[in-house]
Image (cartoon, rainbow, N blue to C red):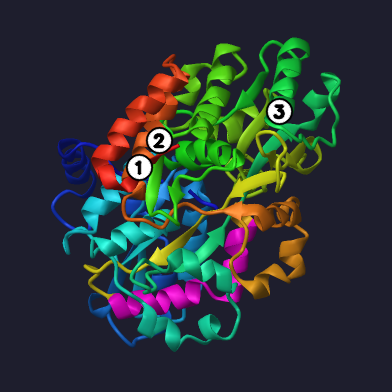
Amino acid sequence: MYRSSKKMLSISTCVLCASMLFGCSKGTETTNTTASTTTPAATSAATAAAKETKAPDAAKKTITITYRDDGTGENGTLYKWFKDVAASYPNKDVIIKQTPIQASEGDYFAKIALALKSKDTAPDIVTEDTFMLNSDASAGLLSPLDDKVKSWTDWTNGSFIEAMKKGVTAADGKIYGVPYNTDSRGLWYNKQIFKQSGLPEDWKPKTWDEVLSAARTIKEKAAKDVVPFWMNMGKATGEATSMQTYEMLLYGTGERLYDDSSSKWTVKSQGILDALSFVDTINKEKLGPPLSKVLNGQAGNSSAREYLPKGKLGISLDGSWIAGNYLPNGAAPWPEYKDVLGFAPMPTSKGQAPGSITLAGGWALSVPANAQHKDEAWDFIKYALNKENTQKLVTASGNITVRADVAKDPGYTQMPFNAIATDYLKNAEFRPARDKYPEVSTQIQAMVESVATGTSPADAMKKYQQDVTRIVGEDKVSVK
């Protein structure tokens, strides 16, 4: 998921955000008033207290769980899932308290990084985007879980897809989380708009030119209020801009952000120019949404929850998880989505091998180094991510499972688009597992936004080259 990614605000801004968010004590929850007044375990804890006399409330331990709230509050998939899992959790001497952060993706990672540094503000469990896990682990913010997973049967008996364990393994070879979803990316499109515009309803573009041609046709033939093409293009959408837009384009040219053979970051190349030129074309030809819509932190929600369901968007470059919005318990229920939407593979730039490209990511549950109840946190993670609970989460969220046993379950395989999204993983690429990636990603977001707002691709790449060189060092960059 999924999903979500991530970070380098100015120090002063970060400190201000952290102090506003967490206040002076671990129990402060100023970003989500619903979560602070109604804890997900409240009902189960009260029932347990009435039935059991093992321990008074004062003797119980409260396990705090922090994750990103994208604005849905108690209607959010994670909120509902944590509440459900907490209600059925067998250990009634533990209270599960949600402490979500309502923020854009970029702000979430900056606030988390600061919160994890202190015992007063660190939660007991934190959701980590796997691309940030190596950075946070290297900074000493997360607890290694190797000893824990070695004695966990689910981890050692093949229940988890082995390849997915790489996403939670840091550069030091240690495991710092348990993954709960993964994802793929492609081109969501509205079949009804395609039909009205004379385009094929079974659409499988082979090149970028075919994608742009379809967007131009929609602009010409569809209703005037229909946005032909949407992709994240702003700093406010954080890692969604880096991964779902820029890296999907860059990797489609055959180039990569980081050259493993030389251990260098590519900062100037034809592939970078080609990727930025695609962004430039979308905006210059007015094939995308108004900048006011795409350059704010809610851009991804706007496209998935508003424009697509209302028939106002032709094509959206986005992730497999957005279908979770349309389920009966999703953020934007839409029963017809499985018939109206198509999910096409994102082609390589000129149709070169392997023909299509996707970036895969995912999220994990981790235990902060400064967590106060690490053993209890681990016990809850094991219960939350067993087969039954994992299946409930990925089914509700629309993400791809990381568990092999869930992947075989009919309840999962029958979900619309799951098979397609999983198939796209055969050509999946992953973000560099390097400490500097989060900082480089911030520069990617700035570069893409600058092109979206009128800077030439060449000038934007020049600025990117300067900024990344400053971050990683002259000896760690490559010019092609």
Residue range highlighted in magenta: 374-395
* Residue beneath the point at 46% across and 32% down: 298
Q: Examine the rendered structure and indicate whether residue 376 appears above or below residue 294.
A: below
Q: Which residue is mark 3?
A: 211
Which element carries disc 1, helix, strand or loop?
helix
Q: Which mark is residue 444?
A: 2
* Residue beneath the point at 37% across and 60% down: 133
* Residue beneath the point at 24% across and 69% down: 369
The answer to which of 222 and 279 lies nearer the viewer is 279
The residue carrying pointer 1 sits among few (fewer than 14), some (14 to 19) or many (20 or more) residues within 10 Å by Cα, namely many
In x, y percent, where is residue 19? 17, 45
Q: Which residue is mark 1?
A: 440
The disc labelled 2 sits on which kind of residue? Answer: Ile
The disc labelled 3 sits on which kind of residue? Answer: Val
On screen, residue 280 versus residue 438, left or right, reads: right
The answer to which of 228 and 268 lies nearer the viewer is 268
The residue carrying pointer 2 sits among few (fewer than 14), some (14 to 19) or many (20 or more) residues within 10 Å by Cα, namely many
